[in-house]
Image: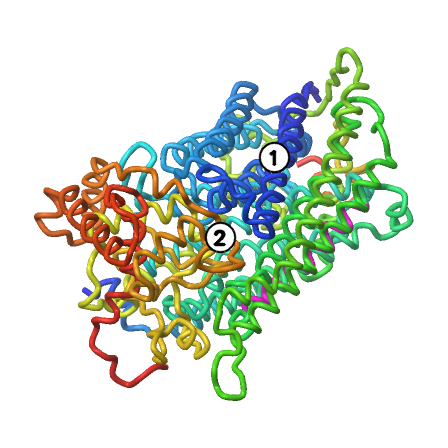
Amino acid sequence: MIRLSELVSALTPAHYAELSLVVFLAVFTGVLVRHGGKRRAAEHAWCARLPLAEDTGDEAGEGAGDDGDPAGGRR
Amino acid sequence: MTKETIRYDDAIVRRFVTATIVWGAVGMLVGLWCALQLAMPRLNVAPLFTFGRLRPLHTNAVIFAFAGNAIFAAVYYSSQRLLKARPLDRLSSIHFWGWQAIIVAAAITLPLGFTQGKEYAELEWPIDVAIAVVWVTFAVNFFAMVRNRREKHLYVALWFYIASIVTIAVLHIFNNLVIPAGLFKSYSIYAGVEDAFMQWWYGHNAVAFVLTTPFLGLMYYFLPKAAERPVYSYRLSILHFWSLVFIYIWAGPHHLHYTALPQWASTLGMIFSVMLWMPSWGGMINGLLTLRGAWNRVAEDPVLKFFVVGLTFYGMSTFEGPMLSVKSVNALSHYTDWNIAHVHGGALGWVGFMTFGMIYWLAPRLFQTKLYSKQLATAHFWVATIGIVLYVLAMWVAGITQGLMWRAFDDTGHLQYPDFLETVTRLLPMYWVRALGGSLYLTGLFLGAYNIFKTWKARPEHYEVIDVVVPPMIRAARAPAAGEPRSLARAAEPPVHWHRTWEGLPALFTTLTIVAVLVASAFEIVPTFLIGDNVPRIKSVKPYTPLELYGRDIYLREGCYNCHSQMIRPFIDETVRYGRNGKPAEYSKPGEFVYDHPFQWGSKRTGPDLAREGGRRDELWHLRHLEDPRSTSMGSVMPSYPHLLADDIPWDVIQPRVDAMAMLDVPYDAQALAQAGTLARAQAEQVGKALVTNGGPKGMETKEVIALIAYLQRLGRDIQLAPAPQGGAP
């Protein structure tokens, strides 16, 4: 069975850089695709209002349920 | 629906805010003293208050005491409100007092010379253990809040806090793995190239996860509060978080360009550093655009002024950082004051101003009264801003000047400035401007401290306790009915976006964050440690003798690494400068450092590189230089070390230190393992005789200076004995 030290020694330094770039780009593209569109805009708007609501115990912003939270403002 | 009542713990926030101000004043005062020492070396008071011992105190105080306490204040205030949960009072108290005890321990042990000799990780192992314990206490307290929360969604600020908490724990533990050789003496388990890699994996990510991500969490909470507007783009904050966490961890090797670190690792660090531009500026833009429609308030609100300029400095620092990581730029900037400018742009501008903005916003709320003086806060802002500009400009000029002077050749092909000292004395005017800038910044801090103190004085006799009524958290859309399978109940829940699901599942979210950090680390660390060719052995390189080992410990104790590097880069100006008799020096090879626990490559050259110092000068020159540097080098800014000529070598500590090194596979022979003290005495006799032969004083062979001289005379000697490389220089 091939040992880990043999495996990594068989790769050239360039392989590591290329592999890491591919991993990064794949992850970043995945996050970008899922969040780039406007489908979640209302939900994001609800999340963004969380800090403005906390002192009073209100839900995220006034009328949170109207602000796009699919669970009516409280999850 | 049944409501629950929570009473937030603002007392713990008040404590951390107070500690932030107090330690900020101490840390920056020490920093100012260090700055003045470089302009006026007589301000060094040996042995306790020399630049080499105070500079680690300054950096540790600012990073872990000032910024650390600010982070805790921000986390405790914002997390309680975002999670609608109160931390555990006892753990909060242990956390606060434990952290302050660690800071006091650092403030005592660093001037005493107890150090691991690794930048930003100087504290010795008992304090490191205490840090781990207190950090775990903090983590347990934080995650207890998360567990007991009434708000299921984790707001973006909390993601940054989670990433900071788990990553700092990982960094701290792995970089501080040591073999103790006494109560306050230890040796890193890593050596040379591997130690350098681990250190800057830690060092750069200390910048990332102590000085960046927690303050981004702070920004995402306090900026919307101050602007009374939601963050500009929550979507952008998601991209910001994941890309930052994923990329930052790779960037450490850019601190080691052109060193003996394998080139692939260095290149990888550079690529990811350049990529950091993207998320960093995404975060800055997200912050600044949060002020859309509120820019008119910036003119009159000191809190927003601090936040806006803090974010601007974040943008500047995160532009400059990737630029400095580009190899061709780094060739000029590394080891110069340009790095000092970069660090202080981030620390004073980003960390400092975000902290002050937060404190001014918090003060009226924590002390339940009006801020004492808005005008004074505005004066603090302007004085500090001018201070940063002076500081950073002076260090930019100093750094670029020195970098250019080092590499300048005249028309005859010789170094234009062969005397290193000339490249230091040229910078003295800039050091004075830096001290002026630092004084202004510190003045601003004192104005702020006075303002907060007066605000506290006007507090009510008893703080009003506010009970916040919240609905209990609904942890599932509905509980399964009797006999109904849980999966059926879940299926009835409304569809939820996958990231929103993660945000409501802190254990999974934390695990994913750890995976992002560890995977990136593994990509770099595993090959560095497993590829044998990374550190080819050199037969002529031998372990330090027992006396040289103790001399090296003195080198660490006095903090010589703060000003001297031990790394000849493969540049013609460096091999020429550090060569001798008209022959260029060998550039540094990885195999030279295999017994260096810890490595001592340094990050700044206020003095010349010492990697090829052995044999360049005689023992008497070193003795005179250490006793009074200006007696041999007119204009030197190095501290004097007269105590080294007075203090005896503690012979009995040498054997345990050799034994500890042997545990790290340093191949000492049987005689060294049995009679290290005797060997050290014998070598000390020889060095003492050489001193007398050169006309030096008698009776020095028992003094510490002898051990340090023995170490300095060893540097670079082994590589001279190596056979000439085939194929020439790269």
Residue B26 is tagged as 1
Left or right: B523 as drawn, with respect to B454: left
Residue that carries the numbered disc 2 in the rendered image? B638
The residue sitting at 56% across, 70% down in the picture is B403
Q: Mark 2 belongs to which amino acid?
A: Met
Q: In this picture, is B251 found above or below B701?
A: below
Tell me where residue B613 appears, x and y as whole percent. Answer: 34, 63
Tell me where residue B427 appears, x and y as whole percent. Answer: 61, 62
Secondary structure at numbered mark 1: helix
Query: In the rendered image, which quarter is residue B703 located in?
Result: top left
Question: Of A71 and B81, which appears nearest the observer?
Answer: B81
Part of the protein shown in magenta: B305-325
Q: In this picture, is B559 found above or below B236?
A: above
Q: In this picture, is B268 found above or below B657?
A: below
Secondary structure at numbered mark 2: loop
Q: Chain of mark 2?
A: B
Q: Considering the image in quadrants, where does the C terminus of chain B appear?
A: bottom left
Q: Residue furthest left?
A: B670
Q: Does residue B473 show up?
A: no
The residue sitting at 54% across, 44% down in the picture is B59
Question: Of B233 and B39, which appears nearest the observer?
Answer: B39
Left or right: B493 as drawn, with respect to B698: right
